[in-house]
Structures are given as C-alpha cells and as structure tokens.
Image (spheres, grey):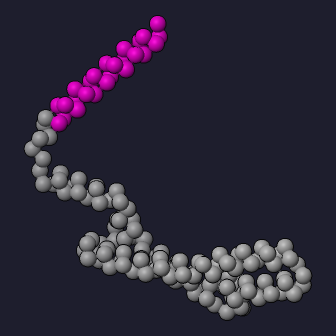
Amino acid sequence: MSRFRTAAVSAAVLASLLTAAGIATAAGDDATSSDEARKTAAASSRDGSRSLCKHAPRMDKRIARAVKRLNAGPARRGSVDRLEKRLERAKAAGHDEVANYLENRLKFRRTLVPTLEQRRKDLTKVEQWCRTERGGKEG
C-alpha cells in the first residue's frame, strides 16, 4: 500500500512541476537582452575561462619556480643535477636497487622540464587571450 502512495505522490509532484515549468516558459518567451547576456556569461563560465584567467598569474609563478628549481645546480634540492649526483654515488657504492629507483626518478624529472616549459608558453597565450577577450578582467 505504501508503494502506491509513494508513486501517487511522486506523480502529483511531477505533474505540478511540469505545469509550473510550462507556465514559466510561456511567461519567459519575451527574453530581454539582459537574460541573453546572463546566459552568455553562464556559458563562458562553464568552460573554466573565468577561473583560469583569475589564477593564471599564480600558476605562472608556480611553474617558473619549479623550472628554476629543476634547472638549478647540484646544491639545490629538487634539481636534476643533484639527482644525477645522488645516482652516481649510489652506483659507485654498489646500491643497485637505490640506483634503479633514482634512475627512474631522474628520467621523470628530465621529462618534466620540457613539459613545464610548454605549459608556461601555453599559459602565456592564455593570459594574452584573457586580456583581449575579457577586457583585462580576472574574475
């Protein structure tokens, strides 16, 4: 018996919602330009452009900091050179497992440099687009 009541109530709610939606659609046929502008703004925010334009300067700084660290000398933690030195020491000491682990990390770190540089170039283009398309507005 309770399934029947639940189904009946659900059907009644659905019917009232559809009726209300039909009335709202009929009343909103005369869409003003502000409604169209709101829809356009909503559509452009769905692709994440507003957020990307807002956060691009911080992302650029973060990428620059990471590239600088990776390209630094052997004294800098996180640099490719420092990892190479660690790998050489592990091989010299005969620590094959450690050397294998460090070698894999070094391969990844070397591929990270060009990837980050490409992201930086792409982000520069995005920042230019933000200035022209969004009129310099970040958010």
Q: Residue at x 78, y 83 (%)?
A: 87
Q: Please state if 43 lies on the left or on the right of 122 as rendered.
A: left
In the rendered image of this protein, does residue 38 appear above or below residue 106?
above
| Residue 33 in the image, given as x and y percentages of width and height | 12, 54
Residue 12 visible (yes or no): yes
Residue positioned most to the top: 1
Q: Is residue 109 magenta?
A: no
Q: Main secondary structure of the magenta part?
A: helix
Q: Nearer the viewer, residue 49 or 102?
A: 102
In the rendered image of this protein, does residue 16 appear above or below residue 121?
above
* Quadrant the C terminus occupies: bottom left
Number of numbered discs present? 0
Over which residues does the magenta segment extend?
Answer: 1-25
Q: Please state if 135 lies on the left or on the right of 5 as rendered.
A: left
In the rendered image of this protein, does residue 104 appear above or below residue 31?
below
Q: Quadrant of residue 72?
A: bottom right
Residue positioned most to the right: 94
Q: Quadrant of residue 82?
A: bottom right
| Residue 60 in the image, given as x and y percentages of width and height | 46, 79
Q: Nearer the viewer, residue 19 or 98?
A: 98
Q: Residue at x 41, y 12 (%)?
A: 5
Q: Residue at x 34, y 71 (%)?
A: 138
Residue positioned most to the left: 30
Q: Residue at x 12, y 47 (%)?
A: 31
| Residue 119 in the image, given as x and y percentages of width and height | 47, 77
| Residue 66 in the image, given as x and y percentages of width and height | 58, 81
Q: Please state if 14 lies on the left or on the right of 77 as rendered.
A: left
Residue 65 visible (yes or no): no
